[in-house]
Image (cartoon, rainbow, N blue to C red):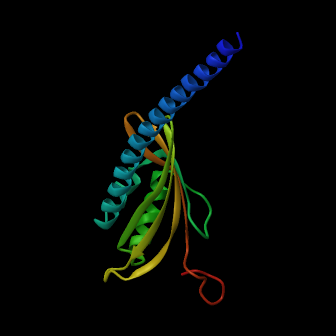
Amino acid sequence: MKTNKFYFLVLGLVLSSIAFTAIDKAAGDSNNGIRAAIEAVTSEWAKQYKAGNVAGVAALYTEDAKLLPPNSDFVAGREAITGVWKSMLDSGVKEVKLETVEVTGMGDSGVEVGTYETMDAEGKVTDKGKFMVFWKKVGSAWKLHRDIWNTSMPAAPGGENK
């Protein structure tokens, strides 16, 4: 009888291991699909910005999106978000390169962590740092819902980053 109990214990552990491996694989496949979708929108964001289409950039955000820019209060809604990106473009930042480091999917939402570099018209790096975006799936489209970033550059004399 002891042998049967041992046999069922081992069998149960093996079957549990197989089940958890299948669940992990399915979650990984799902996360890869979310990552690819989010990276595509991130790429489109950079393309629209480089083209000077700040309204196109803002359209990639949810209707009730919020930016959390450095040295500023919350910026809420697409109209205000358009204004932030127009101001940045007008200040001489002509390109933003974005690199996704990781994506964590959670059903119809996800979190992206990455790095950025901003460049002027001559291609000189003006800032570099990191960002985090909380994404929401709206219909069939992934949209930026909360967007926060901050510089990795040392503070300028006087304690402010430029």
Of the pair 143 and 35, the residue shown nearer to us: 35
Residue 155's image quarter? bottom right
Q: Is residue 139 left or right of residue 155?
A: left
Q: Residue furthest top?
A: 1
Who's the residue at 45% across and 62% down the image?
83
Residue 59 position (above or below residue 137): below
Of the pair 116 and 19, the residue shown nearer to us: 19
Q: Is residue 80 left or right of residue 45?
A: right
Q: Is residue 59 left or right of residue 66?
A: left
Residue 12 position within the rendered picture, expressed as x and y whole percent measured from the top left: 60, 20
Who's the residue at 38% across and 50% down the image?
59
Who's the residue at 36% across and 47% down the image?
36
Q: Residue furthest right?
A: 2
Residue 27 position within the rendered picture, expressed as x and y whole percent measured from the top left: 48, 35
Which quarter shows the C terminus? Answer: bottom right
Q: Residue furthest left?
A: 51
Residue 109 position within the rendered picture, expressed as x and y whole percent measured from the top left: 51, 40
Q: Residue furthest bottom?
A: 157
Who's the residue at 71% across and 14% down the image?
2
Which quarter shows the N terminus? Answer: top right
